[in-house]
Amino acid sequence: MKMLLSIVCGTFSSLRRGPVFLPVLFFGALISLFASLASSWGVAEFRKILFDVGSFGFHIAGNIVAMVWAAQTLAVARQDGTLEIQLASPVPRPLWITGRFLGLALAIIVLGCSMLAIWQASLLVTGFGWMTGAELAAFTLQGVGWLVVASMGLFFASFCGLVTTLFSSIAVFLAGLLTELVAETILSEGGAILAKIFQWFKTFWNLQHFNRTPTFLEAHGSEYFLSGLAYGGFLIAFFLTAASLIFSRREAVF
Amino acid sequence: MTQKAKIELHDINKTFRNDIFTHPEKALEQVNCSFKAGRATALLGHNGAGKTTSMRLILGLLKQDSGTILIDGTPMRREDRRRIGYMPETSKLPPDLCAEELLRFQLNLFKAPSSRQEERTTVGTTWEQIGLSSQHRLKKIRHLSKGMGRRLSWGLAIIHNPDLLILDEPFTGLDPLGRQDLSKWISDWVTKGGSVIMSTHELDLARRLCDDFVVLRTGRVAYSGDSKISDDRLLSFFAGAP
C-alpha cells in the first residue's frame, strides 16, 4: 500500500509541478469563462455557436492534456531513462501502472475541479447563480471521459514510444468521437453487415457518452448519467488491465 | 547490508531487434561468469561489449533470450531486487521532484519504513553519506548540477541498504572531490562485506577498488578472474588476442 501511495504521490507531484499544468489551467479557465459568459448571455444564434465552440475547446483541451500526460508519464519517462531506477525496484509492474494512473487521474481531477471552480466563480460574479445538477453531471461525465482517454494513453505508452503513443491516442480518440455519428449514418443509409459492425464498435468505444449537454442529461434522467459512469469505469479497467499485462511482459528500457 | 550476495550468470544470450527490417544484433552470447559475495568486481570491456546489458539483465530491466541468473544459488526473483542498489550510467531523474522527495519515494519503493521518524532518519543518513549540502534538499532536480545529480543517483542506490551494488560507470560526471568520496565509500562498504559490480573504463580506479575483473569482448566473456593481472595481458583481452 505504501509502495502504491508513493508512486501515486510521485506521479502527481511531477505532473502538478511540470510545465503543462499551469498553462492548461490558465487557458482552460479562459475558455470556460468565455463559454460560460456566451452561454449565459447568449440569445442570438452566433452566441450559441460561440458557446459550442468554447465547450468543444474545453472538452478537447482536457482530452489532449490527458493524452500528453499519459505519454509523459510512461513513454517519455521510459525513453529518457528516468524510469530505469524505479523499474529496477521490486514493485510489480501492474501495481506500478495502477499507481501511475492514479497519480495521473489525481492531477486531471485537480485540474478539472480548478477549472470548474473558476467557471462557477464567473457565473456567480456575473449574477447567474449556482450551476444546476445537470450542468454538474455533464461536467463530471466529461471528467470521466478525460480519465478514460488517459488510461487509453497509458495503454499505448505501455508498448510504444512517445510519437506512436501520441499519434495512436489521437487517432483512437477521434474514432471514439465519431463512431456514434458514423453508426447512425450507416443505419440510415442501409448496409446491414457494415451497420452491425459499427453498432458493435459503437457499443464498445463511444466517447460521445461523455460529451452530453446538460439539456440532454436532464431529458434522459440519472440513469443515463450512472450508466455513463459505469461505462467509463469499464473502459478504464479494460485499458489498465491490458496495459499491465503488456507492460509486465515488455522490457523496461529501450 | 544484511547479508552477502553472490550473482551468477549461466549461458546468457541476449539479442536486440531494433526493427523488423534489420537483422537482430547479438549483445551477449553464452555469457558465463560469477560475481563473488563480499567482493568488488569490475565489469570491463570496450564500448558496446555488453556491460550495461549484463547489468540490466541482472536488474530485470531487460529479459534474456536464454540462460539463468542466480542470486545466492537460486534463480533471481522480483523480490530479490530489494537486495540490489543500482546507479545507472546517466543521472536521468524526474526533473520536477525535490531531491529529498525523490529519496523518500525511492525508499518507499524498496522497503516501507515503519514510521515517519525512521523515514526521516534514513533519508538524513543517506544525505550525509552522499555529501550534498543541506540547502539542496528541497531544490527541484532540474536545478541541480550534473555532479549533484550523480551524487543523488548514488543516494538512490544506497538508501534501502542493499546487499549488492550495481554501478554503471559511477564516476562519470563527478568532480574530483565527488570521485574521492564515492571511491572511499565503496572501499569502506566492501570492507564491511558489501558486494559491488561496477562497470568502468578507468583501469587505475578499477584496480584500486576491485578485487576481481570480468572482461567482456563483443558480448562474450574474455577474462574472469583476479584483478592482479598485468596491464598488457588485460589489454590483450580488450583487443581480442588472449
Image: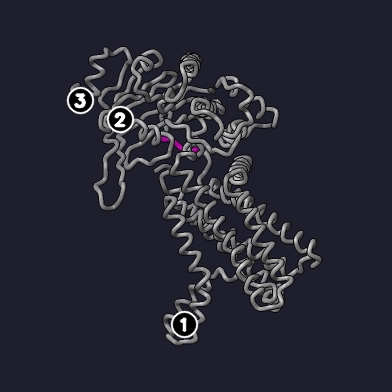
Quarter of the view holding residue B8: top left
Q: For the residues labelled 3 and 2, say whether their Cβ atoms are less than 8 Å apart.
A: no
Q: Amino acid at mark 1?
A: Ile
Q: Are marks 1 and 3 on the same chain?
A: no
- B127 part of magenta stretch: no
**How far from the left and from the top, in percent, is residue A112?**
66, 57
**How far from the left and from the top, in percent, is residue B181?**
50, 16
Label 2 environment density (alpha carbons within 10 Å; few <14, some 14–19, many ≥20): few
What label does residue B240 carry, if any?
3
Residue shown at 55% from the left, 63% from the top: A235
Residue shown at 40% from the left, 24% from the top: B198
First in residue order: circle 3 vs circle 2: 2
Q: Amino acid at mark 2?
A: Asn
Q: Amino acid at mark 3?
A: Gly
> What is the chain identity of the residue bearing mark 2?
B
Q: For the residues labelled 1 and 3, say whether their Cβ atoms are less than 8 Å apart.
A: no
State the residue position of label 2.
B47
Count of numbered marks:
3
